[in-house]
Image (cartoon, grey):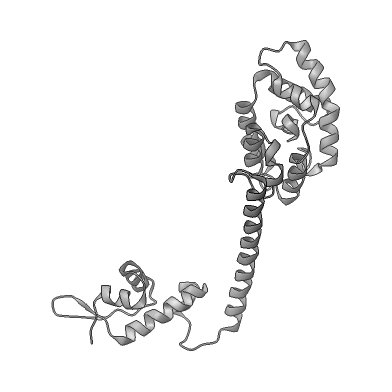
Amino acid sequence: MAWSTQRLADLAGTTVKTVRYYHRVGVLDEPERTPNGYKQYGPAHLVQLLRVRLLADLGVPLAEVRDLDDGAHPESLLRRLRAELDTRLATLERLREEVTAMLEHGAPADLPLGFSAAAHHLSPTDRALIRVYARVYDDVGMADLRRLAALPATPLDDEFVALPADADDAARADLAARYAPEVRALLEAHPGVDARHAHLVVPRGRADATIAPVLLDLFNPAQIDVLVRIAAINGVGGGVSDGGGADSGV
């Protein structure tokens, strides 16, 4: 009995593309060909293909499938696969919990994990900043950012958000002077998002280069000036990324 590539793929519940790929990586033997060049697969190829599919479905890398004897019991490999599955299951469970929280709180689906409960009082600017911070903060930083995001906006937060781009120097200086202690207290209570601490997954320079342009795009010149003044008052530094994202408590 001889089968074409399409027929073999159909019998194994896979595709011709997959069969050809398995040939390329060396996990499926090449069949004999007819004088006019057509491949002729037999039962042995089907059994081999089904074996490869079963191992691949378990998560065994094809490079290891190639070297695995028929009927082998590779205990170390199986233990590693189980550990990988445990990790994936834990990740799926976290995702399931997050989707449940999104449904419960009516939260948008485009926030990092853990922010659904606070979503109802996050502004579009808050959400944009959180997405960017999620690319630079480590787990400690993100945990503090989640706690910070859960705080309600203060009157000074609202005043900062409402500050017009043409606010004069006196108004900027006054707001910075009054706002700086509040920002400092927030950073002291949530050190994971304090720019002076290394709770980052990227080098500090790269974090600044990522955050600063976003702040410049999200805030008007007067607000940026207030952030810089707050950073100077609190002794954090002079960059716009050192203001801590002072709007709405984020």
Q: Quadrant of the N terminus?
A: bottom left
The location of residue 75, given as percent across then percent down, is 60, 83
The location of residue 173, given as percent across then percent down, is 79, 16
Q: Quadrant of residue 228?
A: top right
The residue lying toward the viewer, choosing from 26 and 95, is 95
> Residue drawn 79% across and 25% down?
156
Q: Quadrant of the C terminus?
A: top right
Q: Quadrant of residue 81?
A: bottom right
Q: How many marks?
A: 0
Residue 167 visible to an observer of this rendering? yes
The location of residue 164, given as percent across then percent down, is 68, 16
Q: Quadrant of residue 85?
A: bottom right
> Outermost residue, bottom direction?
71
> Residue drawn 74% across and 40% down?
149
The residue lying toward the viewer, choosing from 141 and 233, is 141
- Is the residue 146 above or below the residue 86 in the image? above
As drawn, is 208 to the left or to the right of 185? left
> Outermost residue, left direction?
36
As drawn, is 200 to the left or to the right of 70? right
The location of residue 96, given as percent across then percent down, is 62, 58
Residue 63 visible to an observer of this rendering? no
As drawn, is 151 to the left or to the right of 224? right
> Residue drawn 67% across and 35% down?
126
The residue lying toward the viewer, choosing from 120 and 58, is 120
